[in-house]
Image (cartoon, coloured by chain):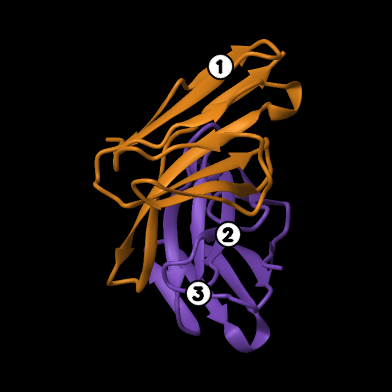
Chain colours: A orange, B purple
Amino acid sequence: EADIYQTPRYLVIGTGKKITLECSQTMGHDKMYWYQQDPGMELHLIHYSYGVNSTEKGDLSSESTVSRIRTEHFPLTLESARPSHTSQYLCASSEYISDRGIDGYTFGSGTRLTVV
Amino acid sequence: GQSLEQPSEVTAVEGAIVQINCTYQTSGFYGLSWYQQHDGGAPTFLSYNGLDGLEETGRFSSFLSRSDSYGYLLLQELQMKDSASYFCASNYGGSQGNLIFGKGTKLSVKP
């Protein structure tokens, strides 16, 4: 049972189009993240948010933007898609887990984006 | 910068034991987590080492040595369903720091 939802699951879109990737979580987590992952490669943090109206850029530079108007919703937007944006985009949220002593992350199933 | 290094691929047979190593840069390092990701799926949490030593969870164990900046994931009694990518990761910067991942190790389990 998924607690974090991403739509669409797959998207093929033409160059120059504006797209928004949706991410919603039902766990009430304050922290949310976007990671970019090329096939067979590592996950790169591109955006994160520590709560409503808080957004920061991650370690990997990205032309995408994010917004956080509601706790449960963290959409990612590409104003003008290019073939170089072709990748998988994974959304995650986290909360502090006292048994571990660190934040525990829950990931969505991802959006596989292809820009042609 | 922050980085974690691990082998890109490992192959083993059903029933065998495999160890996936991870070395890391110490600056900002805060414990070592392991995630499993099947093709097309979401990464899922497997194990965490906050202190040196061995943590055991069923067929999976994880180990950390801070003095060697090194950890590993040990998978025993391998099953076909264990074929997946395995990522080491750390909450760099503190217990609530952002999770930074290694490049991942693709494990192929053969019959």
Mark 1 lies on residue: A11
Closest to the observer, A97 or B59: A97
* Residue type, numbered disc 3: Gly
Residue at the image position 51 percent from the left and 38 percent from the top: A90
Task: From this view, report whether residue B21 is shown above or below residue A46.
Answer: below
- Verify CB contact (< 8 Å) between mark 1 and mark 2: no
Q: Which mark is residue B100?
A: 2
Badge 1 marks a residue whose secondary structure is strand
- In the rendered image, residue A31, in percent from the top left (x then y), is placed at 37, 53
Q: CA separation, marks 1 and 2?
A: 26 Å
Residue B75, image x, y percentages? 52, 60
Mark 1 or mark 3: which is in front?
1
**Quadrant in the rendering for residue B70:** bottom right
- Residue found at x 42% / y 67%: B96
What's the chain of the residue with tag 2?
Answer: B
Amino acid type, label 2: Ile
Name, please, the residue furthest toward the front.
Answer: A53
